[in-house]
Image (cartoon, helix red, strand yellow):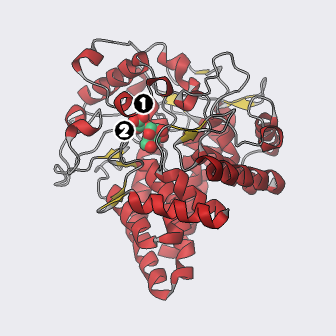
Amino acid sequence: MSADLWNSAAHVLEANWSHDHMVPSRRLYPHQWSWDAAFIAIGLAYTNPTRAWRDLRSLFEAQWPDGRVPHIVFDPGTPENDYFPGPTFWDVPAYGGRAARGSTGLVQPPLHAVAAWEVYRRAASHGTSCARAAGDELAWLYPRLVAQQEYLTGRRDAGGDGLASIVHPWESGLDNSPSWDAAMSAVPADLTLLTRFQRRDIENADAAHRPTDVDYARYLGLVLNYRDGSYADTDLAWRHDFVVECPSFNSILAAAELALVQIAGVVGADPEVHRARAQKITEAISRHLYDPATRTFRSRDVRTRTLSPARCVNGLMPLLLPGLPTEQAEAIMAEAASPRFGLPEQTGLPVPSYDRTAPDFDPLRYWRGPIWINVNWLLRRGMLVHGYRGEAEDLRTAMVRLVHRSGHFEYFHPVTGEGIGAPAFSWTAALSLDLLA
Ligand code: 2M8
Protein backbone atom coordinates (compact mmCIF):
# COMPACT_ATOMS: atom_id res chain seq x y z
CA MET A 1 0.00 0.00 0.00
CA SER A 2 2.75 2.46 0.83
CA ALA A 3 4.43 2.32 -2.61
CA ASP A 4 1.06 3.02 -4.31
CA LEU A 5 0.34 5.91 -2.02
CA TRP A 6 3.84 7.34 -2.39
CA ASN A 7 3.59 7.22 -6.20
CA SER A 8 0.12 8.74 -6.35
CA ALA A 9 1.17 11.53 -3.95
CA ALA A 10 4.28 12.31 -6.02
CA HIS A 11 2.09 12.35 -9.12
CA VAL A 12 -0.34 14.91 -7.60
CA LEU A 13 2.57 17.22 -6.77
CA GLU A 14 3.96 16.85 -10.27
CA ALA A 15 0.58 17.68 -11.82
CA ASN A 16 -0.06 20.71 -9.57
CA TRP A 17 3.27 22.43 -10.22
CA SER A 18 2.87 25.65 -12.20
CA HIS A 19 6.16 27.27 -13.42
CA ASP A 20 7.49 28.58 -10.12
CA HIS A 21 4.86 27.59 -7.55
CA MET A 22 2.42 24.87 -6.54
CA VAL A 23 -1.35 25.34 -6.73
CA PRO A 24 -3.44 23.68 -3.98
CA SER A 25 -5.81 22.30 -6.61
CA ARG A 26 -5.93 22.99 -10.36
CA ARG A 27 -9.64 23.79 -10.53
CA LEU A 28 -10.69 25.23 -7.18
CA TYR A 29 -7.56 27.13 -6.10
CA PRO A 30 -5.56 28.14 -9.20
CA HIS A 31 -3.03 30.45 -7.45
CA GLN A 32 -0.47 30.08 -4.64
CA TRP A 33 -1.70 29.91 -1.03
CA SER A 34 0.52 30.74 1.92
CA TRP A 35 0.13 27.96 4.48
CA ASP A 36 -0.45 25.42 1.70
CA ALA A 37 3.08 26.27 0.49
CA ALA A 38 4.47 25.32 3.91
CA PHE A 39 2.72 21.92 4.01
CA ILE A 40 3.69 21.33 0.38
CA ALA A 41 7.37 22.10 1.02
CA ILE A 42 7.36 19.49 3.80
CA GLY A 43 6.37 16.85 1.21
CA LEU A 44 8.55 18.16 -1.62
CA ALA A 45 11.51 17.82 0.76
CA TYR A 46 11.44 14.10 -0.13
CA THR A 47 10.79 14.17 -3.86
CA ASN A 48 11.99 17.54 -5.15
CA PRO A 49 13.75 19.86 -2.66
CA THR A 50 14.59 22.33 -5.44
CA ARG A 51 10.87 22.91 -5.94
CA ALA A 52 10.28 23.11 -2.19
CA TRP A 53 12.69 26.06 -2.00
CA ARG A 54 11.37 27.57 -5.24
CA ASP A 55 7.80 27.51 -3.89
CA LEU A 56 8.79 29.17 -0.60
CA ARG A 57 10.86 31.75 -2.51
CA SER A 58 7.94 32.57 -4.82
CA LEU A 59 5.77 33.19 -1.77
CA PHE A 60 8.30 35.34 0.08
CA GLU A 61 9.09 37.34 -3.06
CA ALA A 62 5.55 38.67 -2.62
CA GLN A 63 6.14 39.67 1.03
CA TRP A 64 4.99 43.20 1.82
CA PRO A 65 7.42 45.87 3.10
CA ASP A 66 5.69 45.69 6.50
CA GLY A 67 6.60 41.97 6.75
CA ARG A 68 3.21 40.45 6.02
CA VAL A 69 3.27 37.39 3.79
CA PRO A 70 0.09 37.42 1.69
CA HIS A 71 -2.38 34.60 2.01
CA ILE A 72 -2.72 34.29 -1.77
CA VAL A 73 -0.13 35.24 -4.38
CA PHE A 74 -1.97 35.55 -7.66
CA ASP A 75 -0.63 33.93 -10.80
CA PRO A 76 -0.66 36.62 -13.53
CA GLY A 77 -1.16 33.86 -16.11
CA THR A 78 -4.47 32.75 -14.58
CA PRO A 79 -7.58 34.57 -15.84
CA GLU A 80 -9.16 36.94 -13.28
CA ASN A 81 -12.42 35.02 -13.44
CA ASP A 82 -10.93 31.67 -12.42
CA TYR A 83 -11.00 32.55 -8.71
CA PHE A 84 -13.03 35.03 -6.72
CA PRO A 85 -12.09 37.31 -5.03
CA GLY A 86 -9.23 37.92 -7.49
CA PRO A 87 -6.57 40.65 -7.71
CA THR A 88 -8.97 43.39 -8.84
CA PHE A 89 -11.18 42.97 -5.78
CA TRP A 90 -8.22 43.07 -3.40
CA ASP A 91 -6.68 46.11 -5.10
CA VAL A 92 -3.57 46.01 -2.90
CA PRO A 93 -1.07 48.89 -3.02
CA ALA A 94 1.81 48.37 -5.48
CA TYR A 95 4.98 47.51 -3.65
CA GLY A 96 8.57 46.66 -4.55
CA GLY A 97 7.81 46.67 -8.28
CA ARG A 98 5.57 43.65 -7.80
CA ALA A 99 2.44 45.13 -9.29
CA ALA A 100 2.43 42.45 -12.01
CA ARG A 101 1.95 39.64 -9.53
CA GLY A 102 -0.73 40.78 -7.13
CA SER A 103 -1.61 39.36 -3.79
CA THR A 104 -4.23 39.63 -1.09
CA GLY A 105 -3.68 41.80 1.98
CA LEU A 106 -4.47 39.04 4.48
CA VAL A 107 -2.11 36.50 6.04
CA GLN A 108 -2.34 32.81 6.96
CA PRO A 109 -0.76 30.74 9.77
CA PRO A 110 3.03 31.27 9.61
CA LEU A 111 4.14 27.67 9.27
CA HIS A 112 6.96 28.51 6.84
CA ALA A 113 9.85 28.52 9.33
CA VAL A 114 8.82 25.03 10.44
CA ALA A 115 8.66 23.96 6.78
CA ALA A 116 12.00 25.56 5.87
CA TRP A 117 13.67 23.78 8.76
CA GLU A 118 12.15 20.44 7.68
CA VAL A 119 13.36 20.88 4.09
CA TYR A 120 16.82 21.93 5.29
CA ARG A 121 17.30 19.02 7.64
CA ARG A 122 16.41 16.49 4.94
CA ALA A 123 18.66 18.10 2.31
CA ALA A 124 21.81 16.14 3.17
CA SER A 125 20.07 12.88 2.22
CA HIS A 126 19.92 14.20 -1.38
CA GLY A 127 23.72 14.80 -1.59
CA THR A 128 26.22 17.56 -0.86
CA SER A 129 25.19 20.03 -3.56
CA CYS A 130 21.60 19.84 -2.32
CA ALA A 131 22.80 20.43 1.24
CA ARG A 132 24.82 23.46 0.13
CA ALA A 133 21.87 24.90 -1.78
CA ALA A 134 19.69 24.39 1.32
CA GLY A 135 22.12 26.46 3.40
CA ASP A 136 21.90 29.30 0.87
CA GLU A 137 18.11 29.12 0.74
CA LEU A 138 17.86 29.16 4.52
CA ALA A 139 20.11 32.23 4.69
CA TRP A 140 17.89 33.99 2.09
CA LEU A 141 14.73 33.12 3.96
CA TYR A 142 15.86 33.85 7.53
CA PRO A 143 15.48 37.68 7.54
CA ARG A 144 12.18 37.34 5.70
CA LEU A 145 10.84 34.82 8.20
CA VAL A 146 11.90 37.16 11.01
CA ALA A 147 10.09 40.08 9.34
CA GLN A 148 6.96 37.93 9.08
CA GLN A 149 7.11 37.10 12.79
CA GLU A 150 7.72 40.76 13.69
CA TYR A 151 4.69 41.85 11.71
CA LEU A 152 2.45 39.29 13.40
CA THR A 153 3.75 39.78 16.95
CA GLY A 154 3.89 43.57 16.53
CA ARG A 155 1.20 45.22 14.41
CA ARG A 156 -1.15 42.28 14.79
CA ASP A 157 -1.12 42.23 18.58
CA ALA A 158 -4.44 44.07 18.53
CA GLY A 159 -5.47 42.85 21.99
CA GLY A 160 -2.18 43.85 23.65
CA ASP A 161 -1.72 40.51 25.42
CA GLY A 162 1.11 39.14 23.27
CA LEU A 163 -1.08 37.20 20.82
CA ALA A 164 -1.54 37.80 17.08
CA SER A 165 -5.08 38.62 15.99
CA ILE A 166 -6.66 37.51 12.76
CA VAL A 167 -8.87 40.05 11.01
CA HIS A 168 -10.68 37.60 8.73
CA PRO A 169 -11.67 33.92 9.05
CA TRP A 170 -9.62 33.23 5.90
CA GLU A 171 -6.50 34.14 7.91
CA SER A 172 -7.01 31.15 10.18
CA GLY A 173 -7.03 28.71 7.25
CA LEU A 174 -10.13 27.19 8.91
CA ASP A 175 -12.52 29.42 6.98
CA ASN A 176 -16.05 28.63 8.20
CA SER A 177 -15.08 26.95 11.48
CA PRO A 178 -17.71 27.32 14.23
CA SER A 179 -14.86 28.88 16.21
CA TRP A 180 -15.76 32.19 14.47
CA ASP A 181 -19.56 31.98 14.72
CA ALA A 182 -19.90 34.15 17.84
CA ALA A 183 -17.57 36.87 16.54
CA MET A 184 -19.02 36.67 13.01
CA SER A 185 -22.57 37.16 14.26
CA ALA A 186 -21.65 40.83 14.87
CA VAL A 187 -20.33 41.28 11.31
CA PRO A 188 -22.90 42.77 8.92
CA ALA A 189 -23.95 40.39 6.11
CA ASP A 190 -24.66 42.53 3.03
CA LEU A 191 -26.15 40.01 0.63
CA THR A 192 -26.24 42.58 -2.18
CA LEU A 193 -22.48 42.05 -2.43
CA LEU A 194 -23.28 38.64 -3.87
CA THR A 195 -25.35 40.17 -6.61
CA ARG A 196 -22.58 42.63 -7.48
CA PHE A 197 -19.88 39.95 -7.36
CA GLN A 198 -20.07 36.32 -8.35
CA ARG A 199 -18.80 33.44 -6.21
CA ARG A 200 -16.68 31.03 -8.23
CA ASP A 201 -16.13 28.38 -5.57
CA ILE A 202 -19.66 26.99 -5.85
CA GLU A 203 -19.30 26.62 -9.61
CA ASN A 204 -16.38 24.26 -9.03
CA ALA A 205 -17.62 22.47 -5.90
CA ASP A 206 -20.89 21.34 -4.31
CA ALA A 207 -22.51 24.33 -2.54
CA ALA A 208 -23.54 22.08 0.38
CA HIS A 209 -19.85 21.47 1.09
CA ARG A 210 -18.82 25.12 1.06
CA PRO A 211 -19.41 28.21 3.26
CA THR A 212 -22.92 29.68 2.89
CA ASP A 213 -23.88 32.89 1.06
CA VAL A 214 -24.28 34.65 4.41
CA ASP A 215 -20.72 33.60 5.31
CA TYR A 216 -19.47 34.87 1.96
CA ALA A 217 -21.27 38.21 2.27
CA ARG A 218 -19.53 38.69 5.62
CA TYR A 219 -16.16 37.59 4.20
CA LEU A 220 -16.43 40.14 1.41
CA GLY A 221 -17.58 42.92 3.75
CA LEU A 222 -14.56 42.30 5.99
CA VAL A 223 -12.18 42.46 3.03
CA LEU A 224 -13.76 45.72 1.84
CA ASN A 225 -13.42 47.28 5.28
CA TYR A 226 -9.77 46.25 5.65
CA ARG A 227 -9.06 47.33 2.07
CA ASP A 228 -10.73 50.71 2.55
CA GLY A 229 -8.41 51.33 5.49
CA SER A 230 -5.47 50.57 3.15
CA TYR A 231 -4.83 47.29 5.00
CA ALA A 232 -3.48 49.25 7.96
CA ASP A 233 -3.51 47.59 11.37
CA THR A 234 -3.80 50.57 13.69
CA ASP A 235 -6.76 50.61 16.10
CA LEU A 236 -8.07 47.36 14.63
CA ALA A 237 -10.14 46.46 17.68
CA TRP A 238 -12.11 49.71 17.27
CA ARG A 239 -12.53 50.01 13.54
CA HIS A 240 -12.73 46.43 12.30
CA ASP A 241 -15.65 44.05 12.91
CA PHE A 242 -13.67 40.83 13.30
CA VAL A 243 -10.56 40.71 15.49
CA VAL A 244 -9.94 37.30 17.01
CA GLU A 245 -7.08 35.38 18.66
CA CYS A 246 -6.96 31.79 17.38
CA PRO A 247 -5.21 29.08 19.41
CA SER A 248 -4.04 27.30 16.27
CA PHE A 249 -2.68 30.42 14.54
CA ASN A 250 -0.83 31.46 17.69
CA SER A 251 0.53 27.96 18.34
CA ILE A 252 1.97 27.93 14.83
CA LEU A 253 3.37 31.42 15.49
CA ALA A 254 5.21 30.10 18.57
CA ALA A 255 6.30 26.91 16.76
CA ALA A 256 7.77 29.17 14.06
CA GLU A 257 9.91 30.91 16.70
CA LEU A 258 11.17 27.51 17.84
CA ALA A 259 12.07 26.62 14.24
CA LEU A 260 13.85 29.99 14.01
CA VAL A 261 15.95 28.99 17.03
CA GLN A 262 17.30 26.13 14.88
CA ILE A 263 17.60 28.21 11.72
CA ALA A 264 19.41 31.04 13.55
CA GLY A 265 21.97 28.46 14.71
CA VAL A 266 22.72 27.54 11.08
CA VAL A 267 22.82 31.07 9.63
CA GLY A 268 24.89 32.51 12.49
CA ALA A 269 22.16 34.66 14.08
CA ASP A 270 21.15 34.90 17.74
CA PRO A 271 18.75 32.06 18.63
CA GLU A 272 17.92 33.45 22.08
CA VAL A 273 15.57 36.15 20.84
CA HIS A 274 13.46 33.44 19.19
CA ARG A 275 13.49 31.19 22.23
CA ALA A 276 12.27 34.09 24.35
CA ARG A 277 9.49 34.97 21.89
CA ALA A 278 8.31 31.35 21.71
CA GLN A 279 8.09 31.27 25.48
CA LYS A 280 6.17 34.54 25.62
CA ILE A 281 3.59 33.44 23.04
CA THR A 282 3.22 30.04 24.72
CA GLU A 283 2.53 31.75 28.06
CA ALA A 284 -0.02 34.08 26.48
CA ILE A 285 -1.87 31.16 24.83
CA SER A 286 -1.83 29.25 28.08
CA ARG A 287 -3.12 32.22 30.09
CA HIS A 288 -5.64 33.84 27.74
CA LEU A 289 -7.01 31.10 25.47
CA TYR A 290 -7.52 28.31 28.00
CA ASP A 291 -10.80 27.81 29.82
CA PRO A 292 -10.11 25.89 33.06
CA ALA A 293 -13.81 25.12 33.55
CA THR A 294 -14.06 23.02 30.37
CA ARG A 295 -10.32 22.26 30.14
CA THR A 296 -10.27 23.45 26.51
CA PHE A 297 -8.47 26.01 24.38
CA ARG A 298 -10.78 28.23 22.37
CA SER A 299 -10.56 31.36 20.25
CA ARG A 300 -11.00 34.76 21.90
CA ASP A 301 -12.90 37.72 20.49
CA VAL A 302 -10.66 40.72 21.14
CA ARG A 303 -13.56 43.17 20.91
CA THR A 304 -15.65 41.49 23.61
CA ARG A 305 -12.75 39.75 25.47
CA THR A 306 -14.78 36.50 25.48
CA LEU A 307 -13.87 32.95 24.51
CA SER A 308 -15.91 31.28 21.78
CA PRO A 309 -18.17 28.52 23.14
CA ALA A 310 -17.34 26.23 20.18
CA ARG A 311 -14.95 23.31 20.68
CA CYS A 312 -13.04 23.04 17.42
CA VAL A 313 -9.90 21.37 16.16
CA ASN A 314 -7.95 24.64 16.57
CA GLY A 315 -8.20 24.08 20.34
CA LEU A 316 -6.01 20.97 20.03
CA MET A 317 -3.11 22.76 18.35
CA PRO A 318 -1.34 24.20 21.45
CA LEU A 319 -0.05 20.63 21.87
CA LEU A 320 2.62 21.70 19.35
CA LEU A 321 4.29 23.72 22.08
CA PRO A 322 6.87 21.99 24.29
CA GLY A 323 6.52 24.76 26.91
CA LEU A 324 2.81 24.09 27.48
CA PRO A 325 2.07 23.19 31.13
CA THR A 326 1.64 19.42 31.53
CA GLU A 327 -1.93 19.64 32.80
CA GLN A 328 -2.96 21.62 29.70
CA ALA A 329 -1.28 19.08 27.39
CA GLU A 330 -3.16 16.35 29.25
CA ALA A 331 -6.41 18.30 28.85
CA ILE A 332 -5.87 18.46 25.06
CA MET A 333 -5.26 14.71 24.90
CA ALA A 334 -8.40 14.09 26.94
CA GLU A 335 -10.43 16.31 24.61
CA ALA A 336 -8.97 14.58 21.52
CA ALA A 337 -9.81 11.14 22.92
CA SER A 338 -13.33 12.14 24.02
CA PRO A 339 -16.42 11.36 21.87
CA ARG A 340 -16.18 14.98 20.68
CA PHE A 341 -13.11 14.21 18.55
CA GLY A 342 -12.63 10.44 19.07
CA LEU A 343 -9.01 9.60 18.32
CA PRO A 344 -8.59 6.65 15.89
CA GLU A 345 -8.84 4.27 18.83
CA GLN A 346 -12.60 4.91 18.82
CA THR A 347 -13.42 5.77 15.21
CA GLY A 348 -10.57 4.34 13.15
CA LEU A 349 -10.38 7.81 11.59
CA PRO A 350 -8.31 10.97 12.13
CA VAL A 351 -10.02 13.71 14.18
CA PRO A 352 -12.77 15.88 12.62
CA SER A 353 -12.61 19.67 12.40
CA TYR A 354 -15.43 20.17 14.91
CA ASP A 355 -17.02 18.53 17.95
CA ARG A 356 -18.89 15.43 16.68
CA THR A 357 -21.46 15.76 19.48
CA ALA A 358 -22.39 19.39 18.73
CA PRO A 359 -25.94 19.81 17.35
CA ASP A 360 -24.61 21.80 14.38
CA PHE A 361 -21.81 19.34 13.51
CA ASP A 362 -21.99 19.11 9.72
CA PRO A 363 -20.19 16.16 8.14
CA LEU A 364 -20.03 17.83 4.72
CA ARG A 365 -19.55 21.53 5.17
CA TYR A 366 -15.85 22.30 4.92
CA TRP A 367 -14.36 23.25 8.32
CA ARG A 368 -17.57 22.49 10.27
CA GLY A 369 -17.08 18.72 10.61
CA PRO A 370 -15.02 17.05 7.85
CA ILE A 371 -11.59 15.55 8.50
CA TRP A 372 -8.58 17.51 7.21
CA ILE A 373 -5.13 15.96 6.90
CA ASN A 374 -3.14 19.13 7.62
CA VAL A 375 -4.53 19.73 11.11
CA ASN A 376 -4.22 16.03 11.92
CA TRP A 377 -0.60 16.18 10.79
CA LEU A 378 -0.06 19.08 13.22
CA LEU A 379 -1.85 17.22 16.01
CA ARG A 380 0.37 14.18 15.50
CA ARG A 381 3.42 16.42 15.64
CA GLY A 382 2.14 17.81 18.93
CA MET A 383 1.68 14.29 20.30
CA LEU A 384 5.30 13.54 19.49
CA VAL A 385 6.41 16.79 21.18
CA HIS A 386 4.71 15.67 24.39
CA GLY A 387 5.77 12.02 24.22
CA TYR A 388 2.41 10.46 23.25
CA ARG A 389 4.13 8.04 20.90
CA GLY A 390 1.45 5.35 20.74
CA GLU A 391 -1.34 7.84 20.01
CA ALA A 392 0.86 9.57 17.40
CA GLU A 393 1.49 6.28 15.63
CA ASP A 394 -2.22 5.39 15.65
CA LEU A 395 -3.03 8.78 14.17
CA ARG A 396 -0.34 8.41 11.50
CA THR A 397 -1.71 4.99 10.53
CA ALA A 398 -5.28 6.30 10.43
CA MET A 399 -4.28 9.16 8.11
CA VAL A 400 -2.33 6.90 5.75
CA ARG A 401 -5.18 4.37 5.67
CA LEU A 402 -7.77 7.06 4.95
CA VAL A 403 -5.86 8.68 2.09
CA HIS A 404 -4.97 5.30 0.63
CA ARG A 405 -8.60 4.23 0.68
CA SER A 406 -10.21 7.48 -0.48
CA GLY A 407 -7.56 9.36 -2.46
CA HIS A 408 -5.72 12.69 -2.08
CA PHE A 409 -8.87 14.70 -1.39
CA GLU A 410 -9.09 18.13 0.16
CA TYR A 411 -11.14 16.79 3.10
CA PHE A 412 -13.01 13.65 4.16
CA HIS A 413 -16.41 12.67 5.50
CA PRO A 414 -15.97 12.16 9.27
CA VAL A 415 -18.24 9.11 9.40
CA THR A 416 -17.74 7.26 6.11
CA GLY A 417 -14.23 8.52 5.29
CA GLU A 418 -15.35 9.35 1.74
CA GLY A 419 -13.22 12.00 -0.04
CA ILE A 420 -14.91 15.42 -0.42
CA GLY A 421 -13.95 18.76 -1.97
CA ALA A 422 -11.16 18.96 -4.52
CA PRO A 423 -9.48 15.72 -5.65
CA ALA A 424 -5.70 15.69 -6.24
CA PHE A 425 -5.21 18.22 -3.44
CA SER A 426 -1.60 19.25 -2.91
CA TRP A 427 -1.23 19.35 0.90
CA THR A 428 -2.93 15.96 1.33
CA ALA A 429 -0.44 14.49 -1.14
CA ALA A 430 2.57 16.31 0.33
CA LEU A 431 1.81 15.33 3.92
CA SER A 432 1.15 11.72 2.86
CA LEU A 433 4.78 11.60 1.69
CA ASP A 434 5.94 12.78 5.10
CA LEU A 435 3.69 10.30 6.90
CA LEU A 436 5.09 7.42 4.82
CA ALA A 437 8.75 8.43 5.05
C1 2M8 B 1 -9.45 27.42 1.80
O1 2M8 B 1 -9.54 28.83 1.81
C2 2M8 B 1 -9.76 29.61 0.61
C3 2M8 B 1 -9.67 31.08 1.01
O2 2M8 B 1 -8.38 31.37 1.43
C4 2M8 B 1 -11.09 29.39 -0.06
O3 2M8 B 1 -12.02 28.84 0.54
O4 2M8 B 1 -11.22 29.80 -1.22
C5 2M8 B 1 -8.99 26.96 3.20
O5 2M8 B 1 -9.18 25.57 3.36
C6 2M8 B 1 -7.53 27.34 3.45
O6 2M8 B 1 -7.05 26.78 4.63
C7 2M8 B 1 -6.64 26.92 2.29
O7 2M8 B 1 -5.36 27.48 2.49
C8 2M8 B 1 -7.19 27.35 0.92
C9 2M8 B 1 -6.40 26.75 -0.24
O8 2M8 B 1 -6.21 25.37 -0.05
O9 2M8 B 1 -8.56 26.95 0.79
Which residue appears at 57% of the width and 28% of the height?
364
Q: Tell me the crowding category of disc 2: few under 14, some 14 to 19, or many 20 or more residues within 10 angstroms, Cα based.
A: many
Which quarter of the frame holds ligand 1?
Answer: top left
Q: Secondary structure at mark 1?
A: loop
Q: Which residue is mark 1?
A: 167
Kindly identify the amino acid type of the residue bearing the numbered disc 2.
Leu
The reply to whether the residue tagged 2 has its Cβ within 8 angstroms of ligand 1 is yes
Horizontal side of residue 316 vs 84, given as left or right: right
C-alpha span from label 1 to label 2: 8 Å
Badge count: 2
Residue 212 spot, x, y in % from top left: 44, 20
Q: Is residue 149 visible?
A: no
Residues at circles 1 and 2 in contact by the CB criterion of under 8 Å: yes
Q: Does residue 216 lie above or below 173 as drawn?
A: above
Question: Which of the pair 366/305 is nearer the observer?
Answer: 366
Q: Residue furthest bottom?
A: 128
Q: Does residue 322 lie above or below 162 as drawn?
A: below
Residue 354 spot, x, y in % from top left: 65, 29
Question: Which of the pair 126/405 is nearer the observer?
Answer: 405
Kindly identify the amino acid type of the residue bearing the numbered disc 1.
Val
Q: Which residue is mark 2?
A: 106
